[in-house]
Amino acid sequence: MLKTKRLQTIVKGFANHRRIQIIELLSLYPEISVSEISNRLKVNFKTISEHARRLNHSGLILKRYKGQSVLHVLSPLGKDILKFLRILE
């Protein structure tokens, strides 16, 4: 049962068009901030911040602290999910 709960968390993590956009963006621009993601996608900062939180919670992105900045990068699982999503296209 534990594996199915984890799978549910992962699937919920990318089950949103904005979160998929963020995953795709991070594949092109690794280590960018929420502010940069917000600017590139032209979406409200708070909205992107919440999506990034959910992606991080599901293990699809990782945070890296660099001074005052928090940079985001795809996790190995996030890279696998992106490959999976591209197969579905």
Image (cartoon, rainbow, N blue to C red):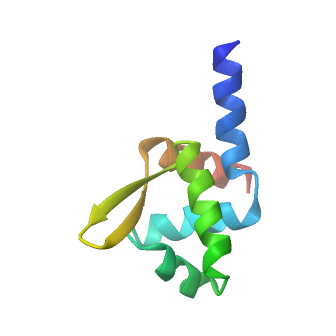
Q: Residue at point 73% right, 57% down?
A: 89
Q: Quadrant of residue 58?
A: top right
Q: Nearer the viewer, residue 6 or 27?
A: 6
Q: Is residue 35 left or right of residue 89?
A: left
Q: Give the answer, above or below, for where 20 lies relative to 62.
A: below
Q: Residue at point 67% right, 82% down?
A: 43
Q: Give the answer, above or below, for where 42 lies relative to 7.
A: below
Q: Nearer the viewer, residue 47 or 85?
A: 47
Residue reaching furthest left? 67
Q: Is residue 25 left or right of residue 65?
A: right
Report x, y in % for residue 73. Answer: 41, 59
Report x, y in % for residue 26. Answer: 48, 66
Q: Is residue 6 left or right of residue 61?
A: right
Q: Nearer the viewer, residue 64 or 27?
A: 64
Q: How many marks?
A: 0
Q: Residue at point 71% right, 41% down?
A: 11
Report x, y in % for residue 54. Answer: 62, 52
Q: Residue at point 58% right, 52% down?
A: 55
